[in-house]
Amino acid sequence: MKITSQEEYGLRVLLRIAKCRERDGMTIQALSFAEGLSTPYVAKLTRMLRMAGYINSTPGNKGGYILSRPAAQININEALKILGGSLFEKAFCEDYSGILKFCTNSVDCSIRSLWQMVQITIDNLLDKITLEDLIGSEMNADQLINTIIEQNIKTFMAGNGKINT
């Protein structure tokens, strides 16, 4: 499994905008310089984030990008899906059927179950994290994520080792 550059850089741009204290936000050029990315790539990412409703542009020649809503209301899972999609999509089996029109395992596939469980687990974690949770230090984010993981393990164990979906 890999996190795409678009997901990584898009999330970094979104976080950089969230941390900005300037009333007019950050320009594409400032974002490009701060993140070490090309201006056209930052323009692409900000367009995606703006079209999805995460950021707004401020008018004028000093204008830039600001969050469209508070960071506490921006779900990381949803933002990542806008930037790159899910790890496991419903069409996954159709996309990887080999040379045949339908996968030879389309009726009984334990691997599909594995990918679904991985996606559910990732969604359960990322749904609990907001952009605001990432604004602080790496240590604070680590503590939050570890707390969420511990809660998930306790819930899992309380359910006799069965994941509720």
Image (tube, rainbow, N blue to C red):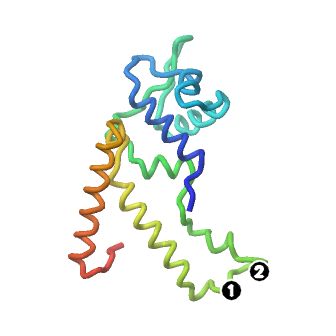
Task: Quickly name the residue at label 1.
Answer: 104
Question: What amino acid is labelled 2 in the image?
Answer: Leu
Q: Is residue 26 above or below residue 115?
A: above
Question: What amino acid is labelled 1 in the image?
Answer: Thr
Horizontally, residue 116 falls left or right of residue 2, namely left
Q: Which label sits on residue 161? A: none
Residue at 32 percent of width and 36 percent of height: 136
Residue at 32 percent of width and 45 percent of height: 141
Residue 78, percent from left and from top: 45, 50
Horizontally, residue 120 falls left or right of residue 6, namely left
Quadrant containing the C terminus in the rendered view: bottom left
Task: Quickly name the residue at label 2.
Answer: 100
Residue at 51 percent of width and 72 percent of height: 115
**Outermost residue toward the top in this view:** 61
Q: Is residue 81 above or below residue 113?
A: above
Residue at 75 percent of width and 78 percent of height: 101
Residue 152 image-quadrant placement: bottom left
Residue 27, percent from left and from top: 54, 21
**Outermost residue toward the right in this view:** 99
Disc 1, SS: loop
